[in-house]
Image: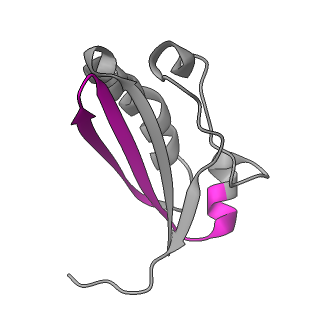
């Protein structure tokens, strides 16, 4: 199993709106892709900024490619992201799950 990690920053004022937008777009697309095993959306408020971390779990790199396209290291963005995000970070990170403790 693999984990895909994406990070983005919004203003604190827009963070609740952005969460709803994330659930309607990015999370929905993650979950709707064959091979995804789940999605976590995390938020940390730091002063006037809100950091978002999406962790999605996948069966394989080819499953990630069904969501992300050929370059699975490149972050996927939607047209309205520019209305919320302070910058568009260019890449994501991938990790292998080596151990699971229930």
Residue 74 placed where, x, y %?
69, 47
Residue 38 in the magenta stretch? The answer is yes
At 64% from the left edge and 47% from the top edge, which residue is drawn?
91
At 29% from the left edge and 45% from the top edge, which residue is drawn?
42
Relative horizontal placement of residue 96, taking residue 47 as reference (left or right): right
Residue 10 placed where, x, y %?
39, 24
Furthest-left residue in this view: 102
Q: Up-down: is 14 above or below 26?
A: above
Q: Up-down: is 11 above or below 52?
A: above
The image quadrant of residue 84 is: top left
Foreground pick, 8 / 65 = 8
Quarter of the picture holding the C terminus:
bottom left
| Region in magenta | 37-64
Relative horizontal placement of residue 78, taking residue 40 as reference (left or right): right
Residue 76 in the magenta stretch? The answer is no
Foreground pick, 85 / 77 = 85
Residue 87 placed where, x, y %?
55, 27
């Amino acid at each position: 199993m693999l984990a895909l990690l994406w990070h983005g920053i919004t203003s604190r004022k827009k963070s609740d709106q952005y969460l709803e937008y994330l659930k309607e777009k990015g999370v929905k697309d993650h979950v709707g892709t064959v091979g995804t095993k789940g999605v976590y959306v995390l938020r940390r408020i730091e002063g006037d900024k809100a950091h978002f971390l999406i962790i999605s779990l996948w069966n394989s790199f080819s499953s990630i490619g069904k969501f992300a396209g050929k370059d699975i290291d490149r972050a996927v963005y939607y047209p309205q992201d520019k209305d919320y995000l302070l910058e568009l970070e260019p890449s994501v990170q991938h990790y292998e799950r080596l151990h699971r403790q229930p």
